[in-house]
């Protein structure tokens, strides 16, 4: 047992033995013990991107802490499963650092895990070659990830599919990628169904625009009229050819999108580069779902941003052979 194994097991044991109320109190104490500038920075970040809850003591809003206590306390078994199924030391260190940040607001260990050698999603140690790929970029934004894919591997790809929900953004992406051939742009959301959904715009950054499901029969007209309607599809239905690589960063819709790609995952075993940070539970839910569909995957985690709070965490699910 190495040092990270010991520390991870020690932390899991602490969570398991501590009841929910005591764990919540512990997390609150750890947050309050942070330097004031870090407390303010985290609160401001959550105001902009409230995926994990908010912090507003003035209005007794502490769901950020409550979710951390609930999700970790209820899912120690899943966290242990994930740790045991991660392939390398870097991944295990990152999982420990995420959990220790959630519980103890440990920043230093998280900083150690930050990846700056490779482009986001394209770790050349994990994926050294990418030849004749059918690459699907779900949440392509301005095309940066597709450009990184092309530039990282400098090889001939077969085809690239770019999915984006915001019309203005996809036009910019088309312009940024206009010199490249065999790129198909899809102005639609990737889900677990075909039909329509609605865009809820983030006022801070269009990169954080989300889709929401509304029952048009029950929603009032004023609510619907303020939203943008967009077509949605599944990868299983929309792409007939074999897929070899899928990247997803779609603001929390990753589970739904993976469910809509289950046949490709089962039959094609594509390389999967999936954001797992928009919801606490995605950290273990997404790899467990992939494992359920196809046992021929090995798992890695990498951190591409978080220095004081874990964001831009990517799960690499790669074929075993």
Image (spheres, grey):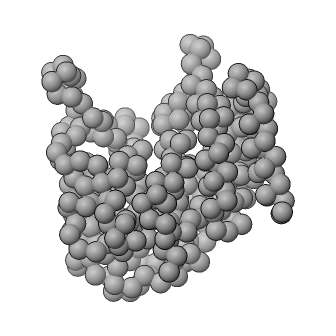
Q: Is residue 167 above or below residue 43?
A: below
x, y (%) of residue 32? 75, 27
Q: Nearer the viewer, residue 170 or 188?
A: 188
Whether residue 53 is visible, yes or no, is yes
Whether residue 180 is visible, yes or no, is no
The quadrant where residue 140 appears:
bottom left
x, y (%) of residue 306? 61, 51
The quadrant where residue 28 appears:
top right
Q: Residue at 53%, 35% (x, y): give it.
A: 52
Q: Residue at 55%, 69% (x, y): give it.
A: 298
Q: Nearer the viewer, residue 292 or 307?
A: 292
Q: Residue at 55%, 50% (x, y): give it.
A: 284
x, y (%) of residue 101? 70, 43
Q: Residue furthest top?
A: 59
Quarter holding the N terminus?
A: bottom right
Q: In the visual, does 233 lie left or right of 304?
A: left
Q: In the visual, does 267 lie left or right of 300?
A: left
């Amino acid at each position: 047992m190495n040092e990270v194994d010991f520390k991870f097991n020690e932390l899991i044991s602490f969570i398991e033995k501590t009841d929910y109320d005591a764990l919540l109190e512990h997390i609150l104490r750890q947050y309050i013990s942070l330097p004031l500038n870090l407390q303010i920075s985290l609160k401001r970040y959550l105001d902009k991107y409230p995926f994990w809850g908010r912090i507003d003591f003035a209005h007794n809003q502490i769901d950020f802490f409550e979710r951390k206590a609930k999700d970790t306390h209820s899912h120690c078994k899943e966290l242990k499963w994930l740790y045991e199924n991660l392939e390398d030391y870097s991944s295990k260190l990152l999982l420990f650092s995420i959990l220790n940040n959630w519980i103890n607001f440990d920043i230093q260990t998280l900083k150690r895990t930050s990846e700056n050698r490779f482009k986001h999603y394209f770790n050349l140690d994990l994926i050294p070659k990418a030849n004749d790929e059918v690459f699907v970029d779900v949440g392509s934004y301005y095309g940066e990830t597709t450009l990184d894919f092309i530039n990282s591997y400098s090889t001939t790809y077969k085809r690239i599919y770019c999915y984006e929900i915001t019309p203005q953004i996809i036009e910019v992406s088309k312009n940024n990628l206009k010199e490249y051939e065999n790129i198909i742009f899809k102005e639609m959301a990737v889900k677990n169904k075909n039909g329509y959904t609605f865009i809820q715009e983030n006022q801070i950054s269009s990169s954080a625009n989300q889709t929401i499901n509304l029952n048009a029969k029950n929603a009032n007209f004023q609510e619907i009229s303020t939203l943008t309607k967009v077509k949605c599809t599944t990868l299983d239905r929309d792409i007939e050819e074999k897929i070899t690589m899928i990247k997803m960063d779609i603001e929390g819709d990753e589970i739904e999108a993976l469910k809509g790609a289950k046949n490709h995952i089962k039959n094609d075993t594509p390389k999967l580069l999936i954001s797992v940070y928009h919801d606490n539970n995605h950290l273990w839910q997404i790899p467990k779902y992939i494992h359920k569909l196809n046992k021929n995957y090995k798992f890695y985690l990498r951190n591409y941003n978080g220095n004081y709070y874990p964001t831009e965490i990517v799960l690499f699910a790669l074929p075993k052979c």
